Amino acid sequence: MFVDRSPRAVERLAGTRDRPIIRVAGCSSRQDAEALRGAALAVPVAPLEEGEYWARDLVGCEVVDGARPVGVVSRMVALPSCEALQVGELLIPMVRDAIRSIDVHARRIDVDMGFVGE
């Protein structure tokens, strides 16, 4: 972890994903913590593997079924069994049977609407 671009070890992680509580090395009192208020926090992330994508990279991509336009990804939705692309009112599951190909650089996702039931 980095605090204002300086490396700091995480000594304890608690709380929830939406409201994490982090104790960093060199910060042992409330005054130490207050001194860090507003500091930029950065956490290095492992590179994505083949076939993995950041949601932010898929939002805005054109969705097609072969040559037929379907729409544009407005957001990713976390479902109980998988994530899905929201395209208008449609939810297209991010599963191999529904997604033919994803080309992030071309901003294009080819899907099988027959699998989705459309």
Image (cartoon, rainbow, N blue to C red):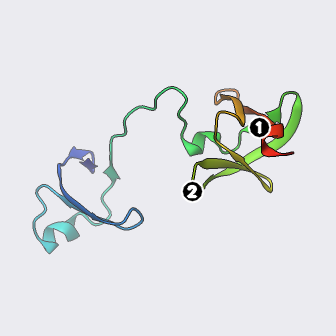
Estimate the x, y position of residue 61 in percent, counting from the top left.
71, 39
Estimate the x, y position of residue 16 in percent, counting from the top left.
36, 66
20 with respect to 100 (left or right): left
Residue under numbered circle 2: 80
Residue at 19 percent across and 67 percent down: it is: 33
Give residue 101's quadrant in the image: top right
Secondary structure found at label 1: strand
Residue under numbered circle 1: 62
103 with respect to 38 (left or right): right
The three-letter amino acid code for the residue at tag 1 is Glu
Residues 1 and 93: in front is: 93
Estimate the x, y position of residue 18 in percent, counting from the top left.
42, 65
Residue at 82 percent across and 44 percent down: it is: 71
Badge 2: residue crowd in 10 Å (few <14, some 14–19, many ≥20): few
Give residue 44's quadrant in the image: top left
Query: Which mark is first along the chain, 1 or 2?
Result: 1
Residues 6 and 99: in front is: 99
Real-space Cα separation, disc 2 to disc 1, in angstroms = 25 Å
Estimate the x, y position of residue 3 in percent, counting from the top left.
25, 52
Give residue 22's quadrant in the image: bottom left
The three-letter amino acid code for the residue at tag 2 is Pro
Residue at 26 percent across and 47 percent down: it is: 2
47 with respect to 74 (left or right): left
Q: Residue furthest bottom?
A: 30
